[in-house]
Amino acid sequence: MHQVIQPKIMYFGTPVVLISTTNPDGTPNLAPLSSAWWINDSCMLGMSRQSQTVRNLERTGECVLNLPDDSLVGAVDRLALTTGREDVPKYKAAIGCEYIPDKFAHAGLTPLPAELVRVQRVLECPVHLEAQLVKSHAFDHGGIAALEVKVIRAHFETTILNPVRRHHVDPDRWRPLIMSFCEFYSLGGNVHSSRLAEVF
Ligand SMILES: Cc1cc2nc3c(=O)[nH]c(=O)nc-3n(C[C@H](O)[C@H](O)[C@H](O)COP(=O)(O)O)c2cc1C
């Protein structure tokens, strides 16, 4: 039997991204994001216009998408309810969100300069995708920005690569941190052989 409900959140289990951008004074900002999907080297990000991240990305046109594995959940959770905006929006202050100028130090993460964009990467994350903004689209009546970005350089920690096919990630070695309905999860094991994997 199915029931009609009005869920507040529809996070059905997507990888967490730590998106890094650069503030107007040149310092780095970092924010968790789970509304992200990729096709080829293009990525679409869904983020509130009230965030410092959207301001930075629209101003500079640059970001790094850092993908944490499940071991980094503590650092990601320390970044929850923080903002790089000194003038914390009222609705965020009401839920206890705090202005944190140095999110890297707050999370216990290490900044590492990117190669093609003027943004810091997160050393501890196994995947760093350096990206440029292609277009910012209005979404959900305009309160959300749907940010189309192009990945221009991709760094992968060698330990998650297929030992033979070095341009392939080995899914058995990659343990993404997953957000499902506001809770953190890891992945379970492989459930079936894949016909798609035979051709790619
Ligand atoms: C795991 C996790 C996932 C999140 N996913 C999103 C998201 O997809 N879109 C969004 O607008 N905010 C998301 N947030 C909330 C932002 O991180 C939050 O608005 C933050 O204050 C933005 O920081 P900034 O203002 O410094 O950019 C998420 C938070 C957490 C902890």
Image: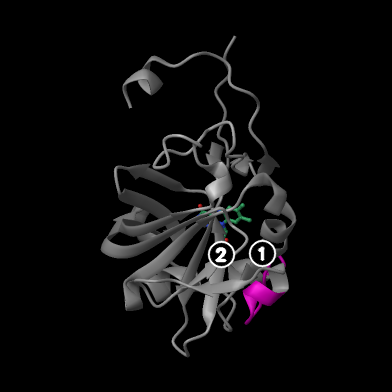
Q: Is mark 2 within 8 Å of ligand 1?
A: yes
Q: Which SS class for mark 1? A: helix
- Where 9 falls versus 33 (above or below)? above
Measuring from the top left, give residue 130's x and y in whole percent.
39, 63
In the image as oriented, which residue stretches furthest toward the bottom? 25
Measuring from the top left, give residue 128's x and y in whole percent.
47, 58
Q: Which residue is mark 2?
A: 31
Q: Which residue is mark 1?
A: 79
132 is within the stretch colored magenta = no
Horizontal side, residue 47 vs residue 148: left or right: right
Residue under the point 46% across and 34% down: 164
Q: Is mark 1 within 8 Å of ligand 1?
A: yes
Residue under the point 70% across and 60% down: 75
Measuring from the top left, give residue 156's x and y in whole percent.
48, 52
Q: Are marks 2 and 1 in contact (CB under 8 Å)?
A: yes
The stretch of residues the image draws in magenta is 94-105
Horizontal side, residue 199 vs residue 122: left or right: left
Q: Quadrant of residue 183?
A: top right
